[in-house]
Image: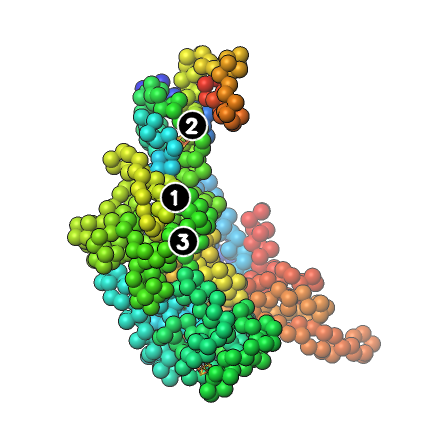
Amino acid sequence: MQRIGVFVCWCGSNIAATVDVQRVAEELKKEPGVVFSADYQYMCSESGQNLIKDAIKEHALTGVVICSCSPRMHENTFRKAAASVGLNPYMVEIANIREQCSWIHKDKATGTEKAIILGRAAIAKVHLNAPLIAGESPVTKRALVIGGGIAGIQTALDIAEAGFEVDIVEKSPTIGGKMAQLDKTFPTLDCSACILTPKMVEAAQQEKIKIYSYSEIDEVKGFVGNFSVKIRRKARYVKEDICTGCGLCTEKCPQKKVPNEFNMGMDNRRAIYIPFAQAVPKVATIDPNYCTMLKTGKCGVCSKICGVKAIDYTQQDEIVEAKYGAIVVATGFNPISPAKFDEFAYSQSPDVVTSLEYERLMNAAGPTNGTLLRPSDGKHPHTIVFVQCVGSRCDGAEKGKPYCSKVCCMYTAKHAMLTREKYPDTDVYVFYIDVRTPGKNFDEFYRRAVEEYNVHYIKGMVGKVVPENGKLKVQAADLLSNEQLHIDADMVVLATAVEPDPSARSLATKLTASMDTNDFFTEAHPKLRPVESPTAGVFLSGMCQGPKDIPETVSQASAAAAKVIGLLVKDKLVGNPCVAHSDELLCNGCSSCEKVCPYGAITYSDKEFRMPDRTTALRRVAAVNPAVCQGCGACTVACPSGAMDLFGFSNNQIMAEVDAICK
Amino acid sequence: MENKANLKEQILTASGVNPLKCMRCGKCSATCPSYDEMEYHPHQFVYMVEKGNIEPLLQSESLYTCLTCFACVERCPRNVQPAKLVEAVRLAVIREQGANHLKPQDIPALLDPDLPQQAIVSAFRKYAK
Ligand SMILES: Cc1cc2nc3c(=O)[nH]c(=O)nc-3n(C[C@H](O)[C@H](O)[C@H](O)COP(=O)(O)OP(=O)(O)OC[C@H]3O[C@@H](n4cnc5c(N)ncnc54)[C@H](O)[C@@H]3O)c2cc1C
Ligand code: SF4
Ligand code: SF4
Ligand code: SF4
Ligand code: SF4
């Protein structure tokens, strides 16, 4: 029989207001095996912990039940306290009487009754607990960063700076992300390329960083400290180590009509291309959807032109397998397509553009070499209407996104200001619902657009845009003057909502990392662990976790790097002893458990077993690798013969808890 | 006061609209083809009903100049459905007066060959109980 101590916490009034803690302590004192029971204001405080330690020593406790907040909060605190006086930490059980009891009940009698029941369940479990000893696993001192936008680049640079190897896997032919496409950046209006490209170059030159461009993640196995990842290096039909990036091939390729994604499809590139002048790596890539040689076997111009014989039409995808201690997700975002909002006539007129397209139209390396020209006729626009919140702040998925995209108020102010600065003869209107500009020097920036640059900010929305006789007829509401406006515009710019990259969801599945309903990666705690995912060893950087501008992205990127460094400096990680194990006598080798294990922890072997009458039989049985098992318990449910069980959460322990609750 | 609250309740129930969902973007009024004909514009309808300021709406010609085109319903980013509110206020007036503004037997005389069927149906919905 265990000697159990029960400790009921008030949590100030968090628990004590809805649970009669004294009664809980008294009632639980009557349970079999309970030799000590007390209540206290704050169990987690130092004096609370001392109360536990003293009781363990004084009453020779073999098990401890703490009725308090969720084990996610203080399980560790109490386990450490127990261990410090020689009690195995896995003999401590928490009954969650706060999140699962006091916070959700209003009536004190009900709350108290439930707290007693939860306490009884924990006591029933402790009776079956056995001391467990955690194993250790080594840490692979190399990090993987998925996504090479500003977030991924910054994270990789910081990790490399601390002396660890980092690989960046970027799905497009170059790193840089959206920031490479921007013209100037708020709030200081420095040229985006001028501040980004030095970082791209640094990433390329940093010995500790390896860039896998034009590559994707195929498979992720393992766990914190020991991930094993398959990276697919997509065939670019150009030998990366030989190509000098001279660009001759991209001038001679006869396939000229390929929409250029870097300029948002507003001009064309060739089938063999280098995305932009400062691309890293500066290597050509053949687009297999357009290359005539790859499609019909006839052409081969680029291979004839290339002086260093870098072209290889027979190249295949290559799978690289590598081990990592930590993984950082930095897959960023995309603007949504405005197709769903055809009241703005995006599909009807080339002069209705998205803000990212507008960035390209203002950019010296863009399709118009930085001169603002209307896409339809190449003329200078004189009246431009900006529409904010397109597809953001909507109710219900069929309308758009429920969240505020956060960056569009500021970049619209930027676009309006830059337009008025460069072309003072242009009339610029911005239709807004609210102007949201929290951030250092942000509101001042917006006010400058109004006060110094005379941008017409109008509180209201655009209702519809009708292309007519070379103009865009804009019908809008001016809510403050209570009138409907009709503006003949030359261009309309839509500040479209941002959304996570479409590849993010399948990546989350591979990483067993969780996402919210909008497909943004979820952080482990919205306030206290903002750069960690709930999956140990997986960290978050940049827009993939939620809308944010460059300053915030970079801060988060460095924070994620700090977390990674904190992990990689460790030589060993203390594992979780609550792992699965199989009872070989019950196992029938059916493979059910192997199929459900997300970590690949289960293997099979043929083993000899003694049978009646001194015979032996060879049977296939499952074995769990305790270093790989994360204790998720999937196998224990899948096993049809009940051979799989979890240390610390055995079927017996759980049934004992259920019995105690149902008694 | 109680009557006022009742009227608001009645209109909200009849329309199924929750004006608290409105974020005051004005897209309904931006899109409304009958804007200049309306004394109170769709976004104002939503706000006035929310505040329980319904008396002026009951008196307003706006009830009959709304075309029931539902453009505001289609475009509202928050699914508020302003036109349904306009319709509910209209119904409240008609119910109060206990009179139909349009009787079925009056329709043939008013028919115009260019008038779309939808307009007749919607007029009927608007002016009759
Ligand atoms: C029109 C516009 C103007 C803006 N102007 C400003 C401004 O002036 N100032 C400012 O501070 N912010 C501005 N922003 C915001 C800024 O663009 C973002 O804060 C920043 O780009 C976020 O960086 P990121 O690295 O998180 O994402 P991204 O830039 O999107 O980078 C993500 C990278 O990951 C790669 N990737 C995605 N999925 C995968 C995958 N599965 N595997 C491998 N790689 C993958 C992508 O190819 C991309 O290279 C603007 C945004 C827009 C839309
Ligand atoms: S493939 Fe050859 S021609 Fe093309 S950029 Fe590379 S080195 Fe130059
Ligand atoms: S940042 Fe501004 S424009 Fe963008 S969704 Fe939020 S409020 Fe609208
Ligand atoms: S339904 Fe009425 S209020 Fe709504 S847009 Fe049409 S005319 Fe305007
Ligand atoms: S469009 Fe919808 S959210 Fe916007 S003001 Fe009108 S009712 Fe309110």
Q: Give the residue at x 39% y 44%.
A: A468
The answer to whether dots 3 and 2 both sit on one chain is no
Mark seen at residue A544: none
Q: Which residue is mark 2?
A: B67
Q: Give the secondary structure at mark 1.
A: strand
Disc 3 from disc 2: Cα separation: 32 Å
Q: Give the secondary structure at mark 2.
A: loop
Say which amino acid is labelled 3: Pro
Q: Give the residue at x 46% y 56%.
A: A519
Q: Chain of mark 2?
A: B
Say which amino acid is labelled 1: Glu
Image quadrant occupied by the N terminus of chain A: bottom right
Ligand 4 within 8 Å of the CB at mark 2: yes
How many residues crowd mark 2 within 10 Å: few (<14), some (14–19), many (20+)? some
Of B70 and A437, the residue lying toward us: B70
How was the colour assigned to the protein in this rendering?
Answer: rainbow
- Relative image position of residue A575 (x, y in whole percent): 48, 72
Q: Nearer the viewer, mark 3 or mark 2?
A: 3
Q: Is residue A657 above or below residue B64?
A: below
Q: Chain of mark 1?
A: A
CB under 8 Å between discs 3 and 1: no
Of A346 and A159, the residue lying toward us: A346
Of A405 and A121, the residue lying toward us: A405
Q: Which residue is mark 1?
A: A468
Q: Which image quarter has ligand 2?
A: bottom left
Mark seen at residue A350: 3
Query: Which residue reaches farthest bottom?
Result: A308
How many residues crowd mark 3 within 10 Å: few (<14), some (14–19), many (20+)? some
